[in-house]
Image: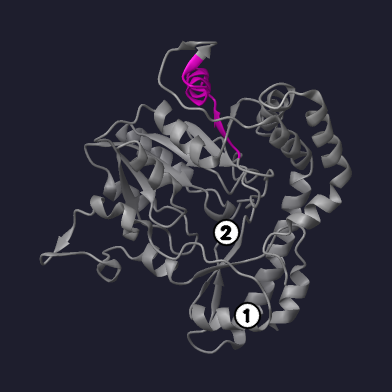
């Protein structure tokens, strides 16, 4: 079976570099913090142009929580999040006692819809979390205009998009930006890991304190924080992979172009209701293609075709977030005395997309030519 993400192939290619880096950490006796973590943070900042400060942490979810804490999110506050994405943005807002407010998406790019964001702003809205979904940058120019008009902050969730760019690099659009180093990400380590980025020195200091038990110095706890650290071994792995990131992203984009050409031809002869529509990538965006995501008009039939060809797939994400049971308490809408369901949703792009989206393998160590041949 073809792996969805070929981490074994990646390790084989960089084995000498990785084993050398891992051995140096293990022999050093410095496993938390130290040279490797400090060097990684500098290299990540340099990759983004040098003006952004980087603070590593234990996971992308921790990074979102820390970012919200740095923005002083309080119970009763509201944060606008996309309705179609991984649970973490909404989950972290709810975890801190605030209310996630779900904005709809653009049904072609699959990114948060600025029009829907504007509609959801209320007196308790404090900020927007915009997700660079599947590696494409969200529409930050429009979102920043909205944020300025309503005095809101923006957190950029770039968990899937470190290395993406439009007019500027991903991870530089937010007041605070975050990424994840989960192993399957375009830049991944061998466990959980994450990072936060900001151009503001005051926020950088606060973020570093929050991630270290609210401590600005040993046993000096100015605020209540948390314990969220990236260990030295993961940092060493990431430093090796960062050196190869751009070449891997170039291969991902080549793989995406092959899929695009295949599905364009596929759709010319597809039966009515059987088309496969790739996620639209906005002109000028260099996407990381964390996954190659398409909208299948008949997803069950396409899944059967993939199974018959022994091609792996993932469904990201099978439900609009606001209909997850954990967010039921945030439902306020009532229609004729009945709480709205997905079928009654007044702005249904997130619901429709959740029923059509399916992702194919695309990493730099995936043989996309083989997959296309299997699907012909």
Q: In which quarter of the image is the C terminus?
A: bottom right
Q: Which residue lies furthest to the right in this view?
A: 16
Colour scheme of the rendered structure: one colour
Instruction: Tell me, yes or no, whether the highlighted magenta stretch contains residue 19.
Output: no
Q: In which quarter of the image is the N terminus?
A: bottom right
- Residue at x 40%, y 64% (from the top left corner): 319
Left or right of 2 on screen, residue 16: right
Left or right of 173 on screen, residue 84: left
Q: Which residue lies furthest to the left in this view?
A: 337
Q: Which residue is at the front of the view, 119 or 218?
A: 218
Element type at marker 2?
A: loop
Q: Which of marks 1 and 2 is nearer the N terminus?
A: 2
Whether residue 106 is visible here, answered yes or no, is yes
Please state the horizontal and vertical placement of residue 217, each as a whole percent of the image.
Answer: 54, 10
**Disc 2: CA contacts within 10 A as few (<14), some (14-19) or many (>=20):** some
Q: Which residue is labeled 2 in the image?
A: 281
Q: Which residue is labeled 1 in the image?
A: 307
- Residue at x 47%, y 42% (from the top left corner): 141
Whether residue 142 is visible here, answered yes or no, is no
Q: Which residue is at the front of the view, 353 or 325?
A: 325
Please state the horizontal and vertical placement of residue 337, each as a whole percent of the image.
Answer: 10, 65
Q: In this view, does 51 lie above or below 253?
A: above
The magenta stretch is 193-215
């Amino acid at each position: 079976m073809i792996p969805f993400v070929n981490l074994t192939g990646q390790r084989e290619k960089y084995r000498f570099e990785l084993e050398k880096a891992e051995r140096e950490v293990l022999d050093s006796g410095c496993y938390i913090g130290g040279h490797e973590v400090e060097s990684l943070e500098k290299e990540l900042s340099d990759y983004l142009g040098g003006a952004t400060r980087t603070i590593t942490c234990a996971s992308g979810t921790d990074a979102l929580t820390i970012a919200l804490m740095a923005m002083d999110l309080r119970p009763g506050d509201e944060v606008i999040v996309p309705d179609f994405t991984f649970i973490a943005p909404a989950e972290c807002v709810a975890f801190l006692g605030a209310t996630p407010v779900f904005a709809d998406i653009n049904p072609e790019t699959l990114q948060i819809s600025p029009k829907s964001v504007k509609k959801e702003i209320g007196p308790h809205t404090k900020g927007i979390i915009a997700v660079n979904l599947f590696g494409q940058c969200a529409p930050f120019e429009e979102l920043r205009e909205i944020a300025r008009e309503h005095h809101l902050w923006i957190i950029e969730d770039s968990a899937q998009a470190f290395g993406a760019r439009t007019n500027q690099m991903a991870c530089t659009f937010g007041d605070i930006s975050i990424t994840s180093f989960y192993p399957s990400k375009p830049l991944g380590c061998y466990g959980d890991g994450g990072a936060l980025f900001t151009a503001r020195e005051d926020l950088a200091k606060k973020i570093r304190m929050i991630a270290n038990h609210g401590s600005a110095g040993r046993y000096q706890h100015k605020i209540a924080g948390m314990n969220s650290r990236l260990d030295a071994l993961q940092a060493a792995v990431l430093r090796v992979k960062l050196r190869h990131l751009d070449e891997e992203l170039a291969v991902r984009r080549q793989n995406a172009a092959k899929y695009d050409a295949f599905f364009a031809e596929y759709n010319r002869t597809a039966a009515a209701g059987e088309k496969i529509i790739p996620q639209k990538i906005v002109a000028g965006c260099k996407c990381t293609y964390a996954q190659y995501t398409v909208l299948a008009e008949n997803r069950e039939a396409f899944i059967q075709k993939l199974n018959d060809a022994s091609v792996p797939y993932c469904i990201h994400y099978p439900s609009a977030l606001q209909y997850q049971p954990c967010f039921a308490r945030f439902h306020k809408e009532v229609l004729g005395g009945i709480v709205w369901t997905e079928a009654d949703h007044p702005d249904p792009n997130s619901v429709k997309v959740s029923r059509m989206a399916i992702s194919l393998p695309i990493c730099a160590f995936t043989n996309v030519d083989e997959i296309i041949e299997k699907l012909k």
